[in-house]
Image (cartoon, helix red, strand yellow):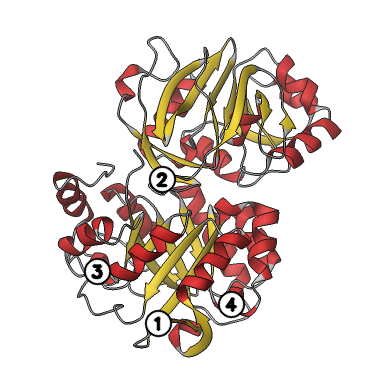
């Protein structure tokens, strides 16, 4: 049986991790490769590197980073952040990235998903969706949650699948940063209605939240950042806990 | 020298990096002479079957690969293309393994693509993957699978049992990505490289 995945997310700016604070046992916690390796050694199943650099040097630094990660890590990783053209994706694939994630660019230009899937295969294309509950439906937001769109989560997720996305990374903006648990109801609905894997993001605060998201939330993978970066939950401990609670997990 | 067949496929670089991590010298090459002379050949692959086979035919690689006599390791799409036929765009393949490649059908409980870590089961005694790896997790990403057959040496289970690894004469193959499967994957590569 395929195991549920635990995915630490590292924010990158100018080739350095921005949330990688307080790692006493690392020589350089700002080094994405070193931090990634640490997580990999601890049992992370995959890694996501989210680039927030906003300069014209971005493409170059990001491909150098992908190459550095691919050279040093032996688990799969996704790179995301501002990818808007086929050429961006191609450079990252050539550098050794296993997957890329697209977000705002795909909402603005949905055929980008078709093109990426056609050229590089669905396995390469993760569609990240940020959404917020408005009282009647989940509305998709752009640009890290600053701009509301007309799109609804479920419709957009289905469209992404039809266009060839290999996975959906859903972040609930209502849950992100709260440490009060994942958006299990919406995640379960996504999982029920889509055939492709769903990665849950936003709200992780305890081991029990991960158990919930894999059972009630029916997620295939769960992503978190600060709770790992700030040692609030250790990955070995978390995986042990999930294993003893009957969740299929790679130990 | 290890030759990694460089063709129109995704993420061949990861395989090269894995070789380097293990301390081996490998080259990415599409030169038939270099491939023929290599001690070991790796046939990696991420991509779509029909366009890849078209490329292999146009470069003569479709005749070269089955005629190789040194140990050859097919990975993921590489393994599928070593079979007789793939349902992916109804593609005739290299015919090294007399097997059919079929598409997973999502059943509500299981997602397609089969993506993530799954365990190795029923490892055949004497295979290039040691029996001690029984139950170990390796990383898969695929929507098509190779049925179980006489050359299946390890299986995994997703919707149904399928071939996780195969072996016939000098041809070896894994559906999973050893280059992305952590220490277990590196050990699988080591076992192949030491053949």
The residue that disc 1 covers is A137
Q: Residue at x 36, y 81 (%)?
A: A173
The quadrant where residue A182 appears:
bottom left
Chain of the residue under the numbered disc 1 shown in the image:
A
Measure how far apart labels 2 and 3 are at the Cα level.
24 Å
Provide the secondary structure element on which disc 4 rests. helix
Marks 2/1 in contact by CB < 8 Å: the verdict is no
Nearer to us: label 4 or label 3: 4
Front-most of A190 and B31?
A190
The quadrant where residue B34 appears:
top right
The residue that disc 2 covers is B110
User: Residue A156 placed where, x, y %?
Assistant: 53, 72
User: Residue B81 placed where, x, y %?
Assistant: 66, 29
Provide the secondary structure element on which disc 2 rests. loop
User: Which residue is the extreme one toward the right?
Assistant: B58
The quadrant where residue B61 appears:
top right
Measure how far apart labels 4 and 3 are at the Cα level.
26 Å
The residue that disc 3 covers is A204
The crowd level at tag 1 (other Cα within 10 Å; few <14, some 14-19, many 20+) is few
Q: Earlier in the sequence, mark 1 or mark 4?
A: 4
User: Residue B3 placed where, x, y %?
Assistant: 66, 29
Measure how far apart labels 1 and 4 are at the Cα level.
18 Å
Chain of the residue under the numbered disc 3 shown in the image:
A
Provide the secondary structure element on which disc 3 rests. loop
The residue that disc 4 covers is A107
Q: Residue at x 78, y 33 (%)?
A: B56
């Amino acid at each position: 049986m395929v195991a549920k995945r635990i995915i630490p997310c590292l924010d990158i700016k100018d080739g350095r991790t921005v949330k990688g604070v307080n790692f006493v046992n690392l020589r350089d916690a700002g080094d994405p490769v070193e931090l990634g390796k640490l997580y990999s050694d601890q049992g992370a199943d995959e890694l996501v590197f989210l680039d927030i650099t906003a300069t014209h040097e971005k493409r170059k630094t990001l491909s150098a980073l992908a190459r550095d990660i691919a050279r040093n890590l032996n688990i799969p990783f996704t790179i995301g952040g501002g990818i808007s053209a086929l050429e961006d994706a191609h450079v990252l694939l050539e550098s050794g990235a296993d997957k890329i994630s697209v977000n705002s660019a795909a909402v603005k230009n949905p055929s980008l998903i078709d093109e990426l899937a056609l050229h590089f295969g669905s396995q390469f294309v993760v569609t990240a969706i940020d959404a917020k509950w408005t009282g009647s439906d989940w509305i998709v937001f752009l640009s890290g949650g600053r701009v509301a769109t007309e799109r609804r989560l479920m419709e957009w997720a289905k469209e992404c699948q039809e266009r060839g996305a290999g996975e959906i990374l859903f972040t609930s903006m209502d849950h992100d940063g709260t440490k009060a648990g994942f958006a299990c109801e919406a995640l379960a609905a996504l999982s029920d209605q889509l055939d492709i894997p769903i990665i849950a993001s936003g709200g992780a605060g305890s081991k029990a939240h991960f158990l919930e998201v894999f059972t009630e939330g029916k997620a295939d993978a769960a992503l978190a950042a600060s709770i790992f970066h700030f040692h609030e939950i250790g990955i070995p401990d978390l995986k042990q806990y999930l294993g003893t609670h009957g969740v299929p997990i790679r130990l | 020298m290890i030759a990694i067949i460089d063709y129109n496929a995704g993420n061949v670089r990861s395989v090269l990096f894995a070789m380097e991590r293990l301390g081996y010298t490998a080259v990415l090459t599409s030169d038939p002479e270099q491939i023929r002379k290599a001690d070991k050949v790796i046939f990696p692959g991420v991509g779509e079957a029909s366009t890849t086979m078209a490329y292999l035919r146009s470069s003569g690689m479709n005749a070269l690969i089955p005629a190789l006599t040194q140990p050859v390791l097919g990975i993921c799409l590489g393994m599928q293309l070593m079979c007789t036929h793939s349902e992916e765009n109804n593609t005739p393949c290299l015919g090294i393994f007399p097997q059919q490649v079929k598409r997973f059908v999502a059943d509500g409980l299981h997602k397609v693509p089969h993506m993530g870590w799954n365990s190795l089961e029923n490892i055949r005694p004497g295979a290039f993957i040691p029996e001690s790896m029984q139950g170990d997790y390796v990383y898969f990403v695929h929507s098509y699978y190779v049925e179980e057959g006489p050359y299946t040496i390890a299986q995994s289970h997703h919707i149904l049992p399928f071939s996780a690894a195969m072996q016939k004469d000098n041809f070896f193959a894994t559906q999973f990505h050893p280059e992305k499967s952590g220490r277990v994957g590196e050990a699988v590569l080591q076992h192949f490289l030491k053949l």
